[in-house]
Image (cartoon, helix red, strand yellow):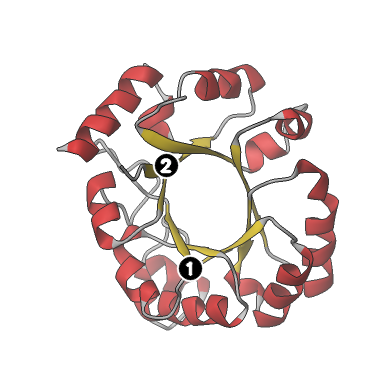
Amino acid sequence: MKKNKIFIACDSNNINKVKEIIRKTKNSKLKIGYKFGLEFLNSKGGREYISRLKNTITFGDYKIADIPNTCVSAIKSIKDLNLNYITIHISSGLKALKAAKKVVGKTKLIGVSILTSLDNKALKEIGYNLDLKKLVYHQAKLAQRAKLDALVCSAQEVKIVRKAFNKEIITPGIRISSKLNDQKRVMTPKAAFKEGANWLVIGRDLTRGNIKKNLKNLSDHLSR
């Protein structure tokens, strides 16, 4: 039976907390990977800890966004971590995406589209005039042209992205509970998989409180 794929967001700068998350989420019913955000990647000892992980699917959520040369240099500087996935903002531009893809090696390069904390109002504040879904579709086409290995988008845009991008789609903004926190474009795990997502990213709903119980709740939700 095919396992549902979940990246657990290790959003902490506390190594002991991250160790606890990993220890308590070895679950045979789900395929689990671990997403390390900027707060852990930049924490004291965080980089060294990731470098020592074995037999673990690792996702370095660097969200690289810079000129092509700096994007390339950044990727080269973390090659020793042997990460399975690394993120780069699609808004870095096609030239930067292609340059990054050339040097990333066996690591899968993930293009980040519009963050799930943004909506059309927020985009207009930044200066974008294009409708959010049209913008995500346009970015998906860029990701396809750059031959990226995966793309991050809201689960609400998976079907749109799939029209332009034929690799893995990873969806954050997943909520088992009704709490939105700082997210705006959200969806339940079961609905996100139904939309066609390959991987879900789930953080607080799994890592706060009783981790094992939260994971069981997720498994139960997906099996219903």
Residue 190: where, in percent of width, then height? 23, 47
Query: Height in image: 186 above or below 220?
Result: below
Of residue 31 and residue 11, the one placed in the foreground of this image is 31
The residue to which callout 1 is attached is: 167
Q: Amino acid at mark 2?
A: Ile
- Name the element at disc 1: loop
Whichever of labels 1 and 2 marks the residue nearer the N terminus, that label is: 2
Of residue 162 and residue 120, the one placed in the foreground of this image is 162
Check contact, mark 1 vs mark 2: CB within 8 A: no
What residue lies at 30% left-to-right and 71% top-to-bottom? 159
Report the number of discs.
2
Residue 151: where, in percent of width, then height? 50, 64
Question: In the visual, does 118 lie left or right of 109?
Answer: left
The residue to which callout 2 is attached is: 6
Of residue 49 and residue 133, the one placed in the foreground of this image is 49
Q: CA distance from mark 1 to mark 2?
A: 17 Å
Residue 93 appears in the picture as rendered:
yes
Q: Amino acid at mark 1?
A: Lys
Question: In the visual, does 78 lie left or right of 175?
Answer: right
Res 5 → quadrant: top left
**Label 2 CA crowd tier, 10 Å (few <14, some 14–19, many 20+):** many
Residue 7: where, in percent of width, then height? 47, 42
